[in-house]
């Protein structure tokens, strides 16, 4: 009896100690770095401007910034700076419009973790690709979160990007209620009326409805029709039961390069029919062996004629192809990832490998990824409008990796840069504010030490970032990156993440 009491006492002390440490972790102040507030004009002298529209360098220019916008651009001898201006010597440096990520996922916990990396790597605007299925979700952020964080970013209360536009929770057909409890019945979109009700539910809350793989044809066309009536865009995956040409007709953007391979071999119609019966099965080797360039070209022409945007996200396919390789497992960007999120990400990577573990299957994945790159190059040559999107795990930094993927696909450095500057501005109808370096435009700029038109990898040779007229010099950028690395190894941040799940149980 005495031994049992002793064991119970030790167990009680252990639980009490762990509870105390967890509570301390939740309330422990988070290591952070303050946003910059540059109250004076900024002048960058003797700099080479990267004209992404023309694909050329304009040398020896001075750029004057005031009140968050570019005021004047002129040769140095023609521009007299204000006495109180913050001066930056741009000699032997290159000024680039800041970048966009048009397929990202900002979660509820992202501000706790790596959100500042967007600004640190020159990414000042993003398109997030889904929002919460219901209020108080501990994991997926809601439209009101995006609006709050964007407002905080532009008022210098938080370091992070503007989140442009808002998107619904992914619309994926029946089965969602098996994974998330207490959702309205129509979230299952089992028929056309439920699909229309889903769109009406999000009207006034978001700008776009996201469709996913398993939505039925009936529900898809109902969504497209109802969204058009309500002035909402339809974006996302090419649903398995819908042809790529049909999707091009109804969607503003189609994500992920794999859909072209799915739809450009003789068995594509049979595969779509199987999807309607819940029997979808992807034979990647057959898609490669029987690829029909004419079918692919028909898709490209349909997208070009409809003005449909293409977001290939090649980094995701590279992870599928090389998930067991050091290029993925020892990616230096993982230093920014908290162990809880790294564990979740590796679980997804390992799941893909476990489904096709043989050497032959792994090679097929790699060939599939390479073919996707090739098709992106052909889509570009055919006139399809391309947007850079990463759909990857680390904020900001991987935009530069995706730029390199697009150049591997056959785009020139200038073409690749347009997918992350001019084209996103066009997508959102914001060409007057973003995408180029011109008087009157927002002062969102990257000062580089090397010319990105010579080598796209030079896009990451960042000396300074100007966001919303505020100058983040190299010392400040280093402080941001060190802060995120500190968070990635912080036990207290782990406690804060877990507390969000305890405080707001979602029913997943």
Image (cartoon, helix red, strand yellow):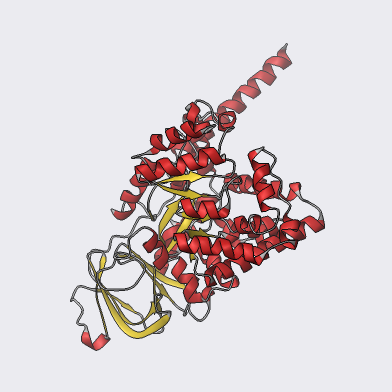
In the rendered image, the quadrant that contains the N terminus is: top right
The x, y position of residue 188, in whole percent, is 53, 32
Q: Would residue 480 be visible to someone looking at this image? A: no
Q: Residue at x 60, y 47 (%)?
A: 339
In front of the other: 53 or 260: 260
The x, y position of residue 154, in whole percent, is 30, 55
The x, y position of residue 183, in whole percent, is 49, 28
The x, y position of residue 456, in whole percent, is 52, 74
From the viewer's perspective, tell me whether residue 383 is left or right of residue 408: left
In front of the other: 403 or 283: 283
Position of 418 relative to 264 (above/below): below
Residue at the bottom extreme of this rendering: 77
In front of the other: 184 or 339: 184
Q: Residue at x 53, y 36 (%)?
A: 498
From the viewer's perspective, tell me whether residue 277 is left or right of residue 58: right
Residue at the top extreme of this rendering: 1
From the viewer's perspective, tell me whether residue 410 is left or right of residue 66: right
Occupied quadrant, residue 162: bottom left
How many numbered discs, if any?
A: 0
In front of the other: 447 or 368: 368
In the rendered image, the quadrant that contains the C terminus is: top right
Position of 438 relative to 301 (above/below): below
Q: Residue at x 30, y 67 (%)?
A: 443
Q: Would residue 224 be visible to someone looking at this image? A: yes
Occupied quadrant, residue 204: top left
Q: Residue at x 38, y 46 (%)?
A: 207
């Amino acid at each position: 009896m005495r031994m049992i009491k002793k064991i119970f006492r030790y167990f009680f002390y252990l639980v009490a100690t762990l509870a105390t440490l967890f509570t301390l972790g939740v309330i422990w102040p988070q290591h952070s770095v303050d946003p910059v507030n540059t109250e004076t004009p900024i002048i960058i002298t003797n700099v080479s401007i990267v004209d992404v529209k023309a694909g050329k360098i304009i040398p020896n220019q001075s750029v004057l910034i005031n009140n968050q916008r570019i005021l004047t651009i002129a040769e140095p001898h023609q521009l007299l700076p204000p006495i109180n201006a913050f001066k930056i010597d741009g000699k032997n440096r290159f000024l680039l419009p800041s970048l966009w990520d048009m397929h990202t996922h900002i979660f509820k916990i992202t501000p706790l973790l790596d959100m500042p990396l967007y600004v640190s790597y020159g990414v000042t605007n993003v398109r997030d690709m889904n929002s919460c299925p219901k209020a108080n979700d501990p994991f997926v952020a809601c439209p009101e979160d995006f609006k709050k964080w964007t407002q905080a970013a532009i008022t210098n209360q938080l370091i992070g990007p503007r989140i442009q536009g808002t998107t619904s929770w992914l619309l994926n057909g029946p089965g969602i209620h098996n994974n998330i409890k207490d959702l309205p019945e129509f979230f299952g979109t089992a028929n056309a009326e439920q699909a229309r009700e889903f769109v009406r539910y999000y009207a006034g809350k978001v700008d776009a409805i996201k469709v996913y793989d398993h939505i039925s044809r009936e529900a898809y066309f109902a969504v497209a029709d109802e969204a058009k009536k309500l002035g909402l865009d339809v974006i996302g995956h090419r649903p398995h039961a819908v042809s790529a040409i049909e999707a091009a007709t109804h969607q503003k953007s189609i994500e992920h390069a794999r859909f072209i391979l799915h739809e450009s071999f003789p068995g594509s119609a049979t595969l779509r029919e199987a999807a309607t019966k819940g029997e979808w099965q992807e034979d990647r080797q057959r898609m490669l062996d029987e690829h029909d360039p004419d079918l692919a070209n028909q898709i490209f022409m349909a997208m070009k004629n409809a003005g449909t945007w293409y977001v290939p996200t090649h980094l995701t396919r590279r992870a599928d192809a090389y998930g067991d390789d050091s290029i993925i497992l020892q990616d230096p960007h993982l230093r920014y990832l908290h162990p809880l999120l790294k564990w979740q990400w590796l679980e997804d990577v390992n799941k893909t490998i476990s489904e096709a573990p043989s050497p032959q299957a792994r090679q097929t994945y790699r060939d599939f990824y390479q073919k996707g790159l090739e098709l992106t190059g052909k889509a570009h040559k055919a006139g399809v409008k391309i947007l850079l999107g990463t759909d990857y795990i680390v904020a900001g930094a991987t935009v530069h990796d995706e730029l390199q993927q697009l150049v591997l696909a056959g785009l020139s450095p200038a073409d690749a840069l347009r997918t992350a500057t001019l084209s996103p501005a066009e997508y959102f109808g914001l060409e007057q504010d973003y995408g180029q370096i011109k008087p009157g435009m927002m002062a969102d700029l990257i000062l580089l030490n090397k010319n990105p038109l010579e080598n796209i990898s030079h896009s990451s040779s960042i000396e300074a970032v100007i966001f919303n007229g505020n100058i983040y010099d190299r010392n400040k950028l280093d402080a941001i990156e060190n802060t995120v690395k500190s968070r990635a190894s912080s036990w207290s941040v782990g406690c804060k993440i877990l507390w969000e799940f305890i405080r707001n149980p979602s029913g997943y």
